[in-house]
Image (cartoon, helix red, strand yellow):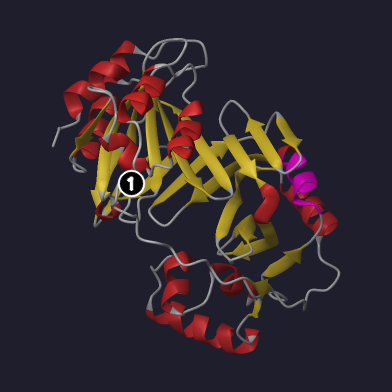
Amino acid sequence: MKTILTTGRAELKDSWAAFKQENPKTRIRDAAKELNTTEAELVATGIGENVILLEGDFRELLKEAGSLGHVMALTRNDHVVHERKGVYENISFNNHVGLVLGADIDLRLFLGDWKFGFAVHESDRHSLQFFNSNGDAAHKIYLTEKSEKAGYDALVEKYKAADQDAQLLILPRAEKKTEEETMPEIDVEAFQAEWLALKDTHDFFTLLRKYKLSRKQALRNAPEGYAYQITPESMKTVFDNASEIQVPIMVFVSNPNCIQIHTGPINKIFVMGPWLNIMDPEFNLHLRQDAIDEAWVVKKPSEAGIVTGIELIDKEGTMFNQFFGKRKPGIPELPEWTKLVEDSATRL
């Protein structure tokens, strides 16, 4: 894969300014696609004005994120945005894999491809924004009215790049392949037996790799009763019912560089255009319902019993959003969650 240089920054800056003038409500990720560039390159057009390029080991920077106090963590992919407020606590790294295990902010970090970092000041909002080698957003941290601005300023000064005119080197994205519908020749009975023998839900990924199955192929060949497809419209009912009975849920959103998890009850649910939204004081979710190609209820055995999840998969076969009832390893899932899924999710 060859490296390509970005568009001239001054030229792109003019195009970006004109685009924002005409499309003030378009999100920057979507704007980048329309302008045939990347989000990182659009952010970089502000360097020298409202953006500061960062450098150094981002693991060390993140270890100091607790100094920012109460912030908003944002992780997204093409179809869903996950925003959770709280404090970065219990931060640790094993090589390039990191954990943030705070009471509110819960992250799995994969920093092997965190290539660019920026401090951004826009519309009275200060943030730290990180991007991968393709220029796609990995993770963002926004200050809130409760944040420690002095801590933010100190962190930005410490990691400010010496050369603010440095050219970004963006790698072209690998072409996404349409999922092969041809089912590989496998021993389905053996696959199902291994599914039923799972002791930890995390081992499911290993099982898929062993049998060379896509997510959809695996779910279609699940043991009887362990996976069934539901209508995408069911998600609104699931959210509404979870809000009504106040069962605490877990909401996972991932991209190749970060997984962000919310655990707790949800309250304010509404639809706006294609977006299904949760808008609570400390947690927001914005889910594009039209991106859901398939929605599944999936049951996986664990040492604490069956774990019931809802998985959303897009047209390319990528699982982009997962939901569970609140649980901890070794503790059975909440019966209220199990019943909620059975009552709320309409089978196809």
Q: Is residue 260 left or right of residue 242?
A: right
Above or below, comparing residue 122 to residue 4 in the picture: above
Residue 7 sits in which quadrant?
bottom right
**Residue 248 in view of the camera:** no
Count residues near mark 1 (Cα–Cα under 10 Å), then give few for <14, some for 14-19, many for 20+: many
Magenta-drawn stretch, dominant element (helix, strand or loop): helix
- Which residue bears the numbered disc 1? 313
> Residue flagged by tag 1: what amino acid is it?
Ile
Residue displayed at 52% across by 48% down: 75
The percent position of residue 81, horizontal first and vertical second, equals 43, 50
Residue 218 sits in which quadrant?
top left
Above or below, comparing residue 59 to residue 195 in the picture: below
Residue displayed at 73% across by 76% down: 48
58 drawn magenta = yes
Residue 245 sits in which quadrant?
top left
Above or below, comparing residue 89 to residue 328 in the picture: below
Residue displayed at 74% across by 36% down: 93
Q: Is residue 169 left or right of residue 191?
A: right
Picture mark count = 1
Q: Secondary structure at mark 1?
A: strand
Residue displayed at 59% across by 61% down: 124
The percent position of residue 88, horizontal first and vertical second, equals 66, 36
The percent position of residue 297, horizontal first and vertical second, equals 27, 30
Q: Nearer the viewer, residue 55 or 181?
A: 181
Q: Is residue 228 left or right of residue 317?
A: left
Q: Quadrant of the N terminus?
A: bottom right
Q: Quadrant of the C terminus?
A: top left
The percent position of residue 27, horizontal first and vertical second, equals 43, 65
Q: Nearer the viewer, residue 186 or 114?
A: 186
348 drawn magenta = no
Which segment did they paint magenta?
A: 57-65
